[in-house]
Image (cartoon, coloured by chain):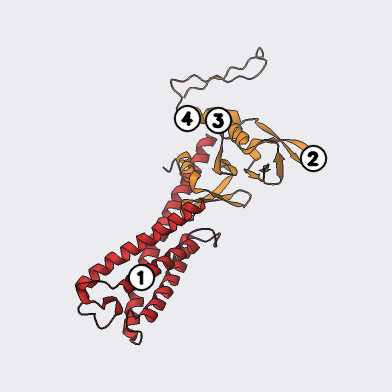
Amino acid sequence: MNKKNTILDFLSHVLIIFGITVTCLIVFVALFGEDAKGVSTIFQLGNKGIAIETLLQYLLLAVIITALRMVFFTDTFIKNASIAVRTIAMFVSIVFAIAVFAAVFGWFPVHMWQAWLAFLVCFAVCAAISIVISTIKEKSDNEKLQTALENFCEGEKE
Amino acid sequence: MKITIDIDEKYAETQVDIHCRQLDTETEKIIATLRMLNQQLMVSKEEENHLLDVTKIIYVEAVERKTFVYTVEDVYESKLRLYEMEERLCAGHFMRISKSCLVNLRQIKSLRNDVERKIRLTLKNGEQIVVSRQYADEMKKRLGVM
């Protein structure tokens, strides 16, 4: 892949992640914006909208997540690791990045252990589901490939 | 499929004739196997020329305008360019897996999906090589997965 395609690929992934997270954010702002107004900087405008600084924070997070994806899901830096291991490493890095953002930008009250617990539980559940699904899919796809190879070699022998 | 074998001293050399209604996958496989039989390739190692049975080749790799032929025991060099190798070998059990590599499908021990829609192959000599995204779908088609 040439350099131009790599940059376009990177930008398209950033915009996809940004688009999805902002869409989810719009729903949360519309539903809980007024109640969470004083608790989180994300909801500082209540249900009236999303502040530009929050959007920029999300854009920066999308850039970081895309960079992490390039680290863990290409063989540029990690040559030989299973998809499950890459997924786990990616999720651990993302949770760390989000925790830093939450602390720095006041996404939720950092002194409240309940807020951290809720964040970690939500993220752990999503990560676990994603890892289990990707592991099952990877195993099933690999078995299909291996069976196809064995059938091919058997067919050639006959 | 009907197989007729006619053994007679009048024949100077062995000849195989195939009579078929159409050229289907099974017939193509028979032709490919026949073509691979006794097919040899002139390769060199330490300035000595060798005739190498193509079934012993695990993979062929082009590195800096040179073509290297890998078997379980040895690495040879060939004067043929990779595209010429492809023309000769890919009618049989070989296929291109990247811009610089051809692999003998019968020398693959195991394979698994890798990142970026690539396929990682473990060969019978224990080496691992990667099928690039460009050729991964073609390999799946060849193996009948797609």
Give x and y (percent) for residue B98: 55, 45
Residue topped by disc 2: B47
- Determine the residue located farthest toward the right in the rendered image: B47
Which chain is drawn using red? A
Which quadrant of the view contains residue A122?
bottom left
For the residue labelled by badge 2, is the local secondary structure a helix, a strand or a loop? loop
Which chain contains the residue that carries disc 4? B
Instruction: Find out whether the residues at labels 2 and 4 contact each other: C-beta distance under 8 Å.
Output: no
Residue toward you, B3 or B34:
B34
Which chain is drawn using orange? B
Q: Are marks 1 and 2 on the same chain?
A: no
Residue toward you, A40 or B108:
A40
Badge 2: residue crowd in 10 Å (few <14, some 14–19, many ≥20): few
Query: Which disc is residue B32 wearing?
Result: 3
Q: Are marks 3 and 4 on the same chain?
A: yes
For the residue labelled by badge 4, is the local secondary structure a helix, a strand or a loop? helix
Mark 3 or 2: in front is 2
Among numbered discs 3 and 4, the one appearing first in the sequence: 4
Mark 1 or 2: in front is 1
Q: Are marks 3 and 2 on the same chain?
A: yes
Name the residue type under label 1: Leu
Residue at 79%, 38% (x, y): give it: B48
Instruction: Find out whether the residues at labels 4 and 1 contact each other: C-beta distance under 8 Å.
Output: no
Among numbered discs 2 and 4, the one appearing first in the sequence: 4
Residue topped by disc 4: B26
Name the residue type under label 4: Glu
Badge 1: residue crowd in 10 Å (few <14, some 14–19, many ≥20): few
Residue topped by disc 1: A56
